[in-house]
Image: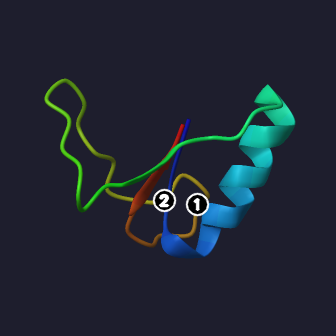
Amino acid sequence: MYVVCKEHVELAIDKFVDEFEDAPDIVDLDEQQFSDWERPIRCCMNCEQEAQFLVV
């Protein structure tokens, strides 16, 4: 699972496919809310931008 900014979506997809050999689901975090999960503030690729997408 990767929580990334718009700039790093493609990189997260590539990493997911390499690791799991399957296509991920992409969730826009501005459109989806989870009751048992708190959205991270920053991109997991250490770029300091706001996390916008969940690649899972």
- What's the residue at 54%, 43% (across, down)? 25
- What's the residue at 62%, 67% (across, down)? 8
Rendering coords of residue 10 (x, y %): 69, 64
Relative to residue 44, is residue 23 depicted above or below?
Answer: above
Residue that extends furthest to the left in the rendered view of this protein: 35
Relative to residue 55, is residue 38 depicted above or below?
Answer: above
Return the residue at label 1: 46
- Location of the C terminus (image quadrant): top right
Q: Give whichever of 31, 49 is nearer the camera.
A: 31
- What's the residue at 13%, 29% (across, down)? 35
Q: Would you identify the image quadrant in which residue 36 lies?
A: top left
| Amino acid type, callout 1 | Asn
Return the residue at label 2: 43
Q: Do the numbered discs 1 and 2 sit on residues whose CB atoms are within 8 Å? A: yes
Q: Give whichever of 26, 42 is nearer the camera.
A: 26
- Location of the N terminus (image quadrant): top right
Relative to residue 52, is residue 19 depicted above or below?
Answer: above
What is the secondary structure assignment of the residue under circle 2?
loop
Rendering coords of residue 48 (x, y %): 47, 70
Q: Is residue 36 left or right of residue 40?
A: left
Disc sitting over residue 14 in the figure: none
| Amino acid type, callout 2 | Cys
